[in-house]
Amino acid sequence: MKSFLPVLIAVAVLALLQLVLGDAAFVTYHATRVGVWVIMAVSLNIINGMTGQFSIGHAGFMAVGAYASSLLTLLLHQYRIGFLPDPVTAQLFFLTALLAGGALAGVAGFLVGLPSLRLKGDYLAIVTLGFGEIIRVIVTNMKVTGGALGLSSIPPHTSLFMVWFWVFVVVLLARRLADSSHGRSLLAIREDEVAAEAMGVDTTSYKVRAFVVSSFFAGVAGGLFAHFLQAINPNSFTFVQSIEVVVMVVAGGLGSTTGAVVAATFLVMLPEGLRTLFLQLGGENQSLAQKVDQVRMPIYGLLLVVIMLTRPQGIFGTHELWDLWKRKKGAPEKPKAVAA
Amino acid sequence: MGEPQRLGERAPREPLLEVRDLKVSYGAIAALKGVSLSVGGGEVVALIGANGAGKTSTLRAVSGMVKPAGGAVVLNGEAVTGLKAHLLVPRGMAHAPEGRGIFPNLTVQENLDLGAYLRHDDAAIAKDLETCFGLFPILRERRKQPGATLSGGEQQMLSISRALMSNPTLLLLDEPSLGLAPQVTQTIFRILRDVNARGVSILLVEQNAHLALELAHWAYVLETGELTMEGTGQALLASEDIRKAYLGE
């Protein structure tokens, strides 16, 4: 029962938020965007941060989930479950589509992971990069996925509640994983793969499992993303998106779940925040605001450079948010992480 | 190549590990061309040889870290050839890899916990932890420190302790003296004697032939993938060929 309590609390809080903020378009728009990328970053952190396997094809798995769930929703759209009101039916179908999209992405993760996780470091990175591009080329050339035009008029089923419920699920899972014996094996693989193997960790199997879990959530994030934008095309899931997620994970601190959450939130909101800031600065003088607005993206890039120069281990290193709090209370500080 | 030259009499023991005609290849390169050796219960067996002779390859093939190209490995009467490490650890084989392989960002305690990764007998694990701290008291002082902050000697002690935490009957040690000061090496070899006295058999790969032969009940000399000599540690230490080739005399 104890393990269900956080879920019940989360559902209640999220339902309340949905009730209060559900109609505020600005907040909903940004909160949904942030939520989707938080799911991406936290799930990628399981493979890049906890297991130390450098994957840069996460957008590929997102694409698999986005297309699969959208196609399923479009297919189920015409049906309804007799006695249930339409919105409930829609949400049930949507949840099914999300799970199906996640599962298919998980299968893709398994298929990619099985052969490629025997590779290490740069080689694995290149294979995952190649995979992401293969997915994009495949959906560009298939009729059922709408080719280069992609899919449109996807029903807008994604709600604030649904996105943040999945954020909650992936964060809870990542944290539980980190504290479990499975998580210990992943950490051991990250720290020293040969030694982990010598300790009796079945390294290949654990790496593939981490990859599948990570891909599943990327697929779900893709589904949420698709039912939020209502239109997707192959260019929504390029190499650039994959790299953005990697940047979030690295900037937050490899292995830190809360770091991934904070960095994803920060990096998604930063361009928007700078825009608002410059509009305020410009005041009545809109032309000045527009001029300053043009340097927004260079500032974003500069900030990334500054983060990596001052904190190469990421904002949180391998710590979690609550570790910082403990340190303030006088607990002995863990020495800085050392590069392996 | 024929049978290796044999020096001295081997004390009879229960067979624990039997390796027959073990072959290992990396691509087209044959690293081991058929090595046969055995380790008895409670025995310390050393494998000495120059760089590239195949010492590490032998250990890696025995412990399932690399797939042998041929031959047989028998542990406690059971054929375990080609089984991966995660299946061998529960059968009582522990491997402390070359270069120590400490988990750098995990604490000493976490490193040791991972050594007992496949065990669930908490009471016995706690007892083995105390044994390790008894053998290497410095590790108790360092238990909350990350592995990377330990000195080379301490890391080697941690590596051996971590392997012991799986409660092995056979311990495979790869170059425990690598990169260590002579005094630290002496300490480690003294403790290895204690470990052996507790009933753990040891298969030791070592460049420092002198120390290895002093400790070993039986030893094998490996040259370019083949055994050329075997004998008691004492007999090999006394051998003219060995003294010239490996002891620098």
Image (cartoon, rainbow, N blue to C red):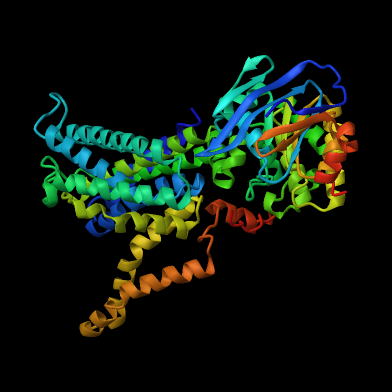
Q: Position of residue A108 (x, y in %)?
A: 31, 37
Which residue is located at x 71 percent, y 34 percent?
B163
- Looking at this view, name the residue that lies furthest to the left: A78
Q: Where is residue B234 in the image (x, y as percent from the top left)?
A: 90, 33
Q: In this view, does A63 lie to the left or right of B53?
A: left
User: Can residue A35 be seen here?
Assistant: no
Between B108 and A179, the residue placed more toward the observer is: B108
Q: Position of residue B225 (x, y in %)?
A: 65, 36
Q: Where is residue B11 in the image (x, y as percent from the top left)?
A: 86, 20
Q: Which of the 4 quarters of the picture holds residue A290?
A: bottom left
Q: Is residue B1 left or right of residue B23?
A: right
Q: In this view, does B96 lie to the left or right of A105?
A: right
- Looking at this view, name the residue that lies furthest to the front: B1
Which residue is located at x 42 percent, y 36 percent?
A7
Between A254 and A52, the residue placed more toward the observer is: A52
Between A174 and A104, the residue placed more toward the observer is: A104
Which residue is located at x 41 percent, y 59 percent?
A247
Q: In this view, does A9 lie above or below B167?
A: below
Q: Is residue A16 above or below residue A337?
A: above
Which residue is located at x 18 percent, y 45 percent?
A139
- What count of labels does the image hold? 0
User: Can residue B56 be seen here?
Assistant: yes
